[in-house]
Image: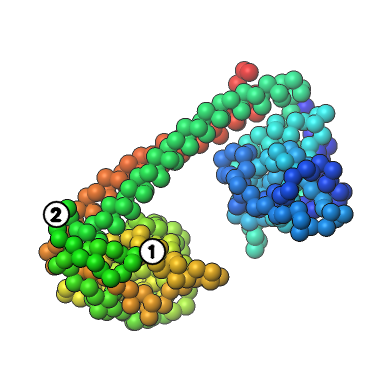
C-alpha cells in the first residue's frame, strides 16, 4: 500500500501537541528531546534531558504519547529520526508523527522514515536554514505492507540491528580505551620524562605533581614569543579552528573561509585555539600562512622545542586546568594573561627532542589503531543502512 503520510498519521511541529496527553504519563520526570538527542544512524534516542514534573502545572501538561516518531525539521540534520518509547516533549526543531497503528506500526514507520532520511536531507533546500516542515512531512509517500508483515520486518530489523549496535558499542569502547591511553602516555612523558628511575621533586603545582629533579620550572610566556602580526590579506593558506582536530594536533581539510582580520604565522609556529580551549586544538604548520584570530600564535625560543611544547599544552592536566578556569562562561575563551602564565617544566633541549620523538612514534601507532576501529564502525553503520533499506523496500525475504 502507498499513501501520503497524512493518511496514516497525525503530524505536529513544536513542543506541545494540541491535546492534553498527561493521562499517559506516570513518571516524575518529563523527557524532553532536541535534535542533539537523536542518533544519525538509528531510531534509538540518546540520553534526553529531563524536566521535573513538579515544576509544571498539572492542568497544563501536554505530552506526546509513547511511540511518537520524531523527525528533525530544521537545521543541518533535517531528516534524523527517533522513536520515543515514553511520553515526551520536543523542541521547535522537531516534527512529531503519531501513526495510526491500525494501518502502520510506529516502529515500522520510524524505520521507513529512517531509510528516507538521507534523501529528505539532500532534497531540503537551504535558504537560511534547511526546513522540512509539518506540511512537507504530511506529503511524504509511505509504502507499507500488511500489519503481520510489518511485525515480521520490525522483529527482523530489531534482531539484526541490535547485533550490529552491540558490535559498534564494543568498538567504541575500544576506541575510547586507546584515546585514554594516548592521553595518559602524553601526560606521563611531559611531566615525568622517559626515565622511570629519574629522581623526582615536588613541582609545587597541585595539578602537575612530581617532576624530574633536573627539570626547570618556567612559564609558557618565558619560553615563547606571542606573535601579534595581523593582516586583512586573505591570499595565503588559511587555518580556521574547525581545521584542527581536537587533542590530535592534526589538520582537517574543510571549506573554511577567512573573515576580517587574521593572524600571521610562520612555518614551525605553535597554534593553540583560545576559544573553547577545552577542545584542545593545537597545531604546528609546516608552511607560512594566516589563521583565525581565535588562535594564539606562539614562536618557541631557543630553549624550547616546538613539538615538545605542543604535546605539553595538549596534555590532559593542562587542558583540564584551563577548562576549569573558563567553566560557566557562555563563550569560553582563555586570554594570554592566563595561558601565558601557565607553568611549564622544561628538561634539557636534547631530552625535549627525545620525548617528542617518543610521543610521535607512540601516538602514530595509537592513531592508526583508532583509525582502523573508525573504519570498522563506519562499515558497520553502512551495513545497518543496507539492511534497513533491503528490509523496508522488500528486497529481503523475511
Inspect this view and state whether residue 286 appears. Answer: no
Q: Position of residue 166 (x, y in %)?
A: 50, 32
Q: Which mark is residue 197?
A: 2
Residue 44 drawn above or below residue 330? above
The image position of residue 333, as x and y in percent, is: 46, 73
* Residue depth check, mark 1 versus mark 2: number of the one nearer the observer: 2
Residue at image point 14% right, 58% down = 198
Q: Nearer the viewer, residue 25 or 43?
A: 25
- Identify the disc placed on residue 182: none
> Which residue is rendered at x = 27% and y = 45% of the image?
365
The N terminus sits in image quarter: top right
x 25%, y 63%: residue = 210
Protein image colouring = rainbow
Residue linked to disc 1: 319
Residue closest to the eye, 261 or 326:
326
Q: Residues within 10 Å of mark 1 (few under 14, many from 20)?
A: some
* Residue 9 position within the rendered picture, expressed as x and y whole percent measured from the top left: 81, 39
271 w.r.t. 141: above or below: below
Whether tag 1 and tag 2 are in contact, CB under 8 A, the answer is: no
Residue occupying the point 70% across, 33% down: 107
Q: In the image, 34: left or right of 336?
A: right
Question: Dividing the picture into quarters, in which one does residue 252 lie?
Answer: bottom left
Closest to the observer, 296 or 53: 53
x and y percentages locating residue 246 in the rendered image: 40, 58
Q: CA–CA distance between discs 1 and 2?
A: 27 Å
Amino acid at each position: 500500500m502507498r499513501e501520503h503520510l497524512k493518511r496514516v498519521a497525525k503530524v505536529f511541529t513544536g513542543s506541545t501537541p494540541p491535546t492534553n496527553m498527561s493521562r499517559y504519563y506516570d513518571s516524575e520526570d518529563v523527557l524532553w528531546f532536541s535534535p542533539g538527542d537523536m542518533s544519525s544512524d538509528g531510531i534509538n534516542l540518546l540520553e534526553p534531558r529531563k524536566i521535573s514534573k513538579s515544576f509544571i502545572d498539572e492542568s497544563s501538561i501536554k505530552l506526546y504519547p509513547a511511540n511518537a516518531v520524531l523527525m528533525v525539521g530544521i537545521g543541518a540534520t533535517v531528516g534524523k529520526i527517533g522513536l520515543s518509547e515514553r511520553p515526551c516533549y520536543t523542541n521547535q526543531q522537531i516534527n512529531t508523527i503519531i501513526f495510526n497503528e491500525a494501518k502502520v506500526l510506529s516502529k515500522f514507520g520510524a524505520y521507513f522514515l529512517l531509510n528516507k532520511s538521507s534523501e529528505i536531507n539532500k532534497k531540503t533546500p537551504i535558504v537560511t536554514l534547511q526546513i522540512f516542515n509539518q506540511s512537507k512531512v504530511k506529503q511524504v509517500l509511505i509504502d507499507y505492507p500488511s500489519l503481520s508483515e510489518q511485525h515480521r520486518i520490525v522483529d527482523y530489523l530489531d534482531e539484526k540491528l541490535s547485533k550490529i549496535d552491540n558490535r559498534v558499542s564494543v568498538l567504541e569502547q575500544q576506541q575510547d580505551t586507546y584515546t585514554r591511553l594516548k592521553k595518559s602516555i602524553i601526560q606521563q612523558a611531559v611531566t615525568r620524562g622517559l626515565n622511570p628511575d629519574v629522581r623526582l621533586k615536588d613541582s609545587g603545582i597541585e595539578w602537575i605533581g612530581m617532576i624530574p629533579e633536573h627539570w626547570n620550572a618556567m612559564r609558557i610566556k618565558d619560553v615563547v614569543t606571542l606573535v601579534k602580526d595581523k593582516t586583512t590579506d586573505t591570499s595565503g593558506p588559511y587555518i580556521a579552528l574547525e581545521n584542527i582536530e581536537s587533542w590530535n594536533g592534526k589538520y582537517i581539510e574543510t571549506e573554511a573561509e577567512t573573515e576580517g582580520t587574521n593572524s600571521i604565522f610562520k612555518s614551525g609556529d605553535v597554534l593553540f585555539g583560545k576559544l573553547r580551549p577545552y577542545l584542545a586544538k593545537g597545531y604546528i604548520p609546516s608552511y607560512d600562512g594566516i589563521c583565525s584570530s581565535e588562535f594564539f600564535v606562539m614562536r618557541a625560543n631557543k630553549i624550547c622545542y616546538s613539538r615538545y611544547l605542543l604535546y605539553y599544552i595538549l596534555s590532559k592536566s593542562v587542558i583540564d586546568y584551563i577548562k576549569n578556569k573558563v567553566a560557566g562562561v557562555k563563550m569560553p575563551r582563555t586570554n594570554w594573561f592566563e595561558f601565558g602564565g601557565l607553568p611549564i617544566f622544561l628538561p634539557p633541549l636534547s631530552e625535549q627532542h627525545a620525548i617528542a620523538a617518543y610521543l610521535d612514534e607512540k601516538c602514530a601507532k595509537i592513531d592508526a589503531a583508532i583509525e582502523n576501529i573508525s573504519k570498522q564502525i563506519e562499515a558497520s553503520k553502512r551495513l545497518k543502512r543496507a539492511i534497513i533499506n533491503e528490509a523496508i523496500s522488500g528486497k529481503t525475504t523475511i
